[in-house]
Image (cartoon, helix red, strand yellow):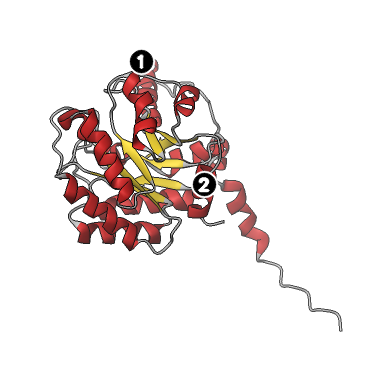
Amino acid sequence: MTPTAKLRALLASDEMLVAPGAYDAITARMIAQAGFSAVYMTGAGTAATLGYPDYGLVTMTEMVDNAARLARAVDVPVIADADTGYGNELNVIRTVQEHERAGTAGIHIEDQVSPKKCGHLDDKQIVPREDWTAKIRAACAARRDPNFLIIARTDSRAMAGFDEAVARSKAALAAGADMVFLEAPQTMEEIAAVPKLVGGACLLNVVRGGKTPEIDLPTAQAMGYKLAIVPGLLFKAVMGACDAALAGLKTQQRHPVLNPDLTVRQAFARMGADQWDSYRTMFRDEPKAAAE
């Protein structure tokens, strides 16, 4: 199946799909090797790989290039952050086209004013509802593959209140969105209410230390969510692991013992070295002529 068909099949299951966040091919491979069925390309993590905070400083082409690398690295569907669509409806159309070419299985487009900010930061701004729903309609019209997933993300909870966020979510579904991403509900009651009030497939953003209360995945599934993304898990875990390894190097004045303490060969094996090694001899022997 194509990545988009795989994603649709996974979302049709009774089980909520969980997509941890990857920011490069290494983390994407680790997610797939851990047994998760989908990868979420985190926009914050992608910005971090370029040395920037999640302040809308990364361009569409940079985001699509990263999504393409992730999609090439794994056999599971990749869902990507597409920020605001990088402009008006014209820009949204090109964004969808480029992501389809890159092999992305789906994207989400939000209603923040550009340049946007992380959904769990303060002082965000949103565009008028009509401007955002026009982008959603443009995104749906632009896709060549009907299985390509269009997720409508609204950041309006913080600025305009929960009722407006629900109303925007409903409007996005009416405009053709396949799923709604109501960002940063602020209480457990709001988290539980979203799938009931929106009336369509819903995504939950699982963020530790953000504006949304912590929730376990079985509870989120019982509430009716179809997809949970965990964007910051590996991004923040890697920073902690790097800090610890570098501190060990400084204090011990030798290569510290890591966890896991992989050999060079074992590390390369996680990146597909065994398959590439098989290519070294695979094409050396000419095929034997067929017997007459």
Residue 264: give its label: none
Residue at numbered disc 1: 251
Q: Residue at x 38, y 24 (%)?
A: 192
Check disc 2 and report the residue beneath it: 76
* Residue drawn where x is 43% and y is 56% of the image: 103
Quadrant of the image occupied by residue 265:
top right
194 in relation to 39, above or below: above
Q: Residue furthest bottom?
A: 292
Q: Nearer the viewer, residue 44 or 242?
A: 44
Q: Where is residue 24 drawn, in percent x and y?
A: 39, 43
Q: In percent of the image, x 43 and y 52: which residue is there? A: 105
- Marks 2 and 1: CB-CB under 8 Å? no
Q: Residue furthest top?
A: 251
Q: Is residue 270 above or below residue 141?
A: above
Percent position (x, y) of residue 52? Answer: 21, 38
Residue at the image position 33 percent from the left and 57 percent from the top: 140
